[in-house]
């Protein structure tokens, strides 16, 4: 209540009583879920609470703090559609939460694969971390295996090193790591940040800190507040210089090394913030902050979807989900299979976000929630978010539970940024998860084993139990 009152007092746009109520409920559900999880001491991570908070941020914050003229292509956002978008998020979160409560049998711990706790195994993990990081430094690393192997390379230079990093970090946090492990971590973090800055993707910079913070919480059961604060500041600082960086290196194709590209982004952001602090004109600090905030809000896009669907753009009846049917087929088997971005491209063109000549260079998603409405309206939101909840419940109980194996826990944490990336549409959100998990397990397969079954969990034969009751203990 205090949070909602604060947002209402500091609002930049008019809000309705109904909209405020929706925003309050959208925050209440994940908050109550978190309190319940903490009270029951279930361990693992409160995935629903985390997802619910993300939805609240991407919808409710924009309702209070974004100017209504900051809409797509200068369209003014109607208050009625804003309230409709908040209600859509509220219904979607509730349906997702109900789906996560469906007890689909998770993969039991006895079926998990575990890292063999030998010195040679940890040497292999260190080798994987170093090798994949060095490969990611090669220009055009994603294309080393050609177009057919692009997805494989993306997994090898993103998810696989993240899992290796988390395995070593957990060793260090439990005081089992060696000096070599600590040295690798101290070298890896700055190198990974520089690589992320040079790539032009803000998410790749923040993800490293996020997954390490999650692993810290899982081991120490404390929230790393310093890391959270640094990540928020980094996002706000770097967001304003991203467009200038991409204009230089993506659109105009300027040649530069990894360090030069990273430095260029930092300098562009620093220059904009410096000008804003010394100016009261169009480049003021408030406007730059609003620009950064708009990048983490789905409210303008979803409000626009509600305004034109189906009055101007008819429901798509599942056309944007066509990629999901082919997602499990590797591209080297089917080189011409549909792209994961096809649904995004349709959305960008049909709803006027991009021109046809720019659609390949700009990737804008409306999220699974809006995509469900675009295809089937309100019934689609209810059914599809419920189905997503069932999948996420299985993911939580198999990879992020208290009794998950170390390897499965590391894979689950590495996948978590994608799970919380609600701006992605279904084909990108869940399309490649199975491939990612299988390929990651394949990479670590030489040092994996099945956990030994605990014989104490097996009931003793009736004859033995009877003998124990009759014969006195020695």
Image: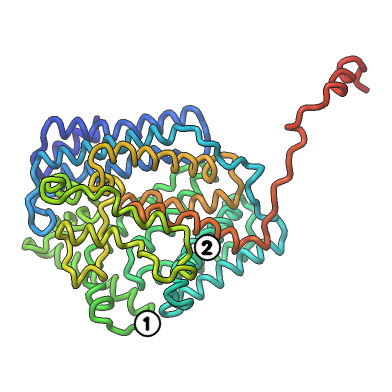
Counting residues from the N terminus, which is met first, the one under dot 1 or under dot 2?
A: 2
| Quarter of the image where the N terminus is located | top left
* Residue 353 picture location, percent across and down: 17, 60
Vertical order, 8 against 176 (above or below): above
Nearest to the eye among marks 1 and 2: give it: 2
Local SS, label 2:
helix
- Location of the C terminus by quadrant is top right
Query: Which residue does the image show at 38% across and 63% down from the upper left?
Result: 204
Instruction: State the image quarter where residue 388 is shown.
Output: top left
Residue 338, compared with residue 390, is above or below; it is below
At a point 61% along the width and 69% down the height, the residue shown is 127
| Neighbourhood count class around disc 2 (C-alpha, 10 Å): few under 14, some 14–19, many 20 upward | many
What is the crowding at mark 1: few (fewer than 14 residues within 10 Å), some, or many (at least 20)? Answer: few
Return the residue at label 2.
Answer: 160
Give the quarter of the image for residue 465. top right
Whether residues under marks 1 and 2 lie with C-beta atoms below 8 angstroms apart, the answer is: no
Considering the numbered disc 1 on the image, is that residue within a helix, a strand or a loop?
loop
Find residue 223 and name its label: none
x and y percentages locating residue 16 in the rendered image: 11, 34
Q: Residue furthest top?
A: 470
Residue depicted at 56% across the width and 72% down the height: 131
Q: From the viewer's side, name the closer residue of 94 and 313.
A: 313
Q: Position of residue 47 (x, y in %)?
A: 43, 41
Looking at the image, residue 473 sits to the left or right of residue 247; the answer is right
x, y (%) of residue 437?
52, 56
Query: Which one is in front, 327 or 10?
Result: 327
Instruction: State whether residue 175 appears in this view.
Output: yes
In the figure, is residue 310 to the left or right of 110?
left
The residue to which callout 1 is attached is: 257
């Amino acid at each position: 209540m205090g949070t909602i009152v604060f947002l209402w007092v500091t609002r930049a746009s008019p809000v309705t009583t109904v909209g405020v109520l929706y925003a309050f409920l959208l925050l209440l559900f994940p908050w109550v879920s978190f309190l319940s999880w903490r009270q029951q001491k279930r361990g693992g991570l409160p995935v629903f609470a985390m997802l619910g908070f993300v939805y609240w941020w991407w919808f409710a914050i924009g309702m209070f703090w974004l100017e209504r003229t900051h809409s797509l292509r200068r369209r003014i956002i109607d208050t009625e559609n804003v309230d409709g978008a908040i209600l859509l998020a509220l219904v979607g979160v509730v349906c997702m939460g109900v789906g996560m409560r469906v007890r689909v049998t998770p993969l039991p711990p006895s079926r998990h694969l575990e890292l063999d706790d030998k010195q040679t195994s940890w040497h292999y993990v260190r080798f994987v971390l170093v090798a994949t990081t060095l490969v990611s430094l090669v220009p055009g690393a994603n294309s080393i295996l050609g177009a057919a192997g692009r997805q494989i390379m993306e997994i090898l230079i993103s998810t696989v090193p993240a899992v290796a990093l988390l395995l070593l970090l957990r060793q260090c946090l439990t005081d089992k790591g060696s000096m070599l492990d600590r040295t690798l971590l101290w070298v890896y973090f700055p190198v990974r940040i520089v690589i992320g800055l040079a790539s032009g993707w803000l998410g790749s910079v923040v993800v490293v800190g996020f997954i390490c913070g999650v692993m810290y919480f899982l081991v120490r059961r404390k929230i790393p507040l310093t890391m959270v604060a640094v990540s928020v500041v980094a996002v706000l600082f770097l967001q304003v210089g991203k467009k200038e960086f991409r204009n230089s290196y993506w659109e105009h194709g300027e040649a530069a090394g990894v360090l030069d590209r990273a430095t260029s982004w930092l300098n562009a952001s620093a220059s904009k913030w410096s000008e804003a602090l010394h100016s009261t004109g169009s480049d003021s600090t408030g406007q730059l902050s609003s620009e950064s905030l708009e990048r983490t809000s789905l409210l303008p896009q979803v409000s626009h979807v509600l305004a034109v669907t189906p009055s101007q753009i008819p429901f798509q009846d599942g056309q944007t989900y066509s990629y999901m049917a082919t997602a499990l087929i590797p591209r080297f088997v089917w080189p011409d299979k549909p792209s994961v971005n096809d649904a995004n491209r349709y959305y960008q063109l049909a709803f006027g976000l991009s021109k046809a000549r720019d659609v390949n260079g700009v990737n804008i998603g409306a999220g699974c929630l809006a995509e469900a409405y675009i295809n089937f309206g309100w019934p689609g939101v209810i059914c599809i978010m419920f189905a997503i909840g069932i999948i996420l419940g299985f993911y939580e109980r198999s990879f992020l539970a208290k009794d998950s194996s170390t390897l499965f826990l590391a894979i689950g944490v590495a996948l978590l940024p994608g799970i919380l990336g609600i701006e992605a549409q279904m084909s990108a959100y869940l399309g490649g998860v199975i491939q990612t998990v299988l390929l990651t397990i394949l990479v670590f397969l030489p040092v994996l084993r099945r956990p030994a079954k605990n014989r104490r969990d097996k009931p003793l034969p009736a004859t033995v139990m009877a003998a124990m009751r009759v014969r006195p203990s020695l």
